[in-house]
Amino acid sequence: MKNCTLVDFKQLMDEILNFFLDHAGRYLRENNLLADTDIKDEFEDLEQQSLIKLMAEHSQMQLSEEMYSVQDLLNLLDQISTVTAGLNDYRQQQINEQYSEILNRYIDLVIEDTGKVYVYNPSLKRRINGILNVRKRYAPLLHKKLEIFYSELTVYAQKNGRFKNASQAVQLILPTLQIKLREFDLQWVQSRLEANKQKILDLTEARKNNEKKEICEDDDFDMSFKIQDKTYLNQIRELQNENKKWEQFLQHPERYFPQQKQLPFNTAYCDEVLVNHLRKHQDLMAKILVNYSG
C-alpha cells in the first residue's frame, strides 16, 4: 500500500457518507430530512459536517436489512477524525496502519454475502479490490475458522441458554474462541510451511529436468517450449521467503501474531468483525438468540 495522506482519509470519509446516503436516502427524502441525497465524488467540509450531524440524530437507524446501524458508520467516521486530528504526531508507518485498519473495518461492515463491496469512488476501487483479492487467497482458512465460531456459539447456547443479541453472543464466547482460533492458526501455519517445502522440492526437481531439455523452436509462432530457468528460481525464492516468515512466526508467535493481518480475525477489533458475520447468518441467529424474528 502506498503512503497514506490526509486526502486518503477524506476520500474514505466521503465513501462512508455516500454509503449512508445510498442506503438511507429514501427515508431521508420521504421524511423531508434532506433534499439532496445524490452520491458525490467529494463533499465540501460543510456538507460533511451537516451529514455527520444528521447521522448522529439518527444513529440507531438500521441499514441493509438491519445488518448494522448508522452508529456503526459513525464509529468509523469518529476513528478517521481522531487519526486525522493528530496526523502530525504519527510516523508514516503508523498512518498507513491506521488507514488500513479503518478501511478493513469498513469492508467488513459492508461486504456482501457474495464477497463483493460496492464502491462509490473509482479511486478507492483499486485499493478495496486489492484487499479483497488477498482475502480470496485466505478464503478456505476463513471458512474453517467460521465453522469453529459457529460451533462455539451453538454449543454455548445449548448448555447455557440463548443469547440476548449478537453482541452478547460474541462477548460471552470470545475468550474461549480466541484460544481455539490461535491454536488453529498455529496448526495451519505449520501445514502451510510443510506444503511450501514440498513445493520447493517439486520445483527444484522440475528445474533439473527442464535443464536437460533442448530448446524447441516453433518457426511459425516464434515460441520456445523450454521454461526459463529464472521462472523456477523466482517461484522457489518466493516460497523460501514465505517459509522464513512462517518459521519466525512459529518460533515467536506472541511477537509475530499481531503482524499477521491476513489471518482472519487476527485483529484488535475481531469482536466487531465476528458480530458482523453473525448478523449476516440469520439461520444461526434464529437458533441461538432469544425471541429472534429475522
Image (cartoon, rainbow, N blue to C red):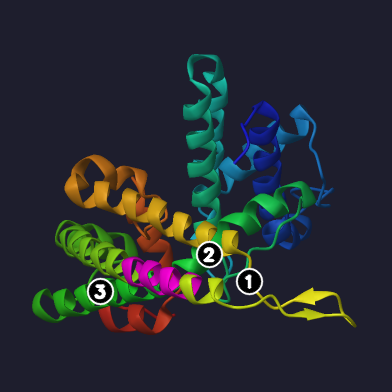
> As drawn, is 223 to the left or to the right of 111?
right
Q: Nearer the viewer, mark 3 or mark 2?
A: 2
Q: Could you tell me how far apart the alpha carbons at marks 2 and 1 are, in whole angstroms?
A: 8 Å
Callout 2 touching callout 1 (CB < 8 Å): yes
Tell me, yes or no, whether the highlighted magenta stretch contains residue 206. yes
Is 56 or 210 nearer to us in this picture? Answer: 210
> What residue does disc 3 label?
148
Is 23 or 259 nearer to us in this picture? Answer: 259
Would residue 61 be seen by someone viewing this image from the given angle? no
Q: Residue at x 45, y 70 (%)?
A: 203
Q: Residue at x 44, y 67 (%)?
A: 138
Name the magenta segment's main secondary structure.
helix
Q: Position of residue 243 (x, y in %)?
A: 34, 55
Q: Could you tell me how far apart the alpha carbons at marks 3 and 2 are, in whole angstroms?
A: 38 Å
Q: Nearer the viewer, mark 1 or mark 3?
A: 1
> What residue does disc 2 label?
232
Q: Could you tell me how far apart the alpha carbons at marks 1 and 3 are, in whole angstroms?
A: 43 Å
Q: Residue at x 49, y 50 (%)?
A: 105
> What residue does disc 1 label?
227
Q: Is residue 174 above or below residue 56?
A: below
> What amino acid is labelled 1 in the image?
Ile
Q: Position of residue 36 (x, y in %)?
A: 84, 48
> What amino acid is labelled 3 in the image?
Ile
Of the image marks 1 and 3, the number of the one nearer the N terminus: 3
Magenta residues, start to end: 196-207
Q: Position of residue 194 (x, y in %)?
A: 27, 68
- As helix, strand or loop, the secondary structure at mark 3 comes to helix
Outermost residue to the left = 159
Q: Is residue 88 above or below residue 82?
A: above
> What amino acid is labelled 2 in the image?
Tyr
Of the image marks 3 and 2, the number of the one nearer the N terminus: 3
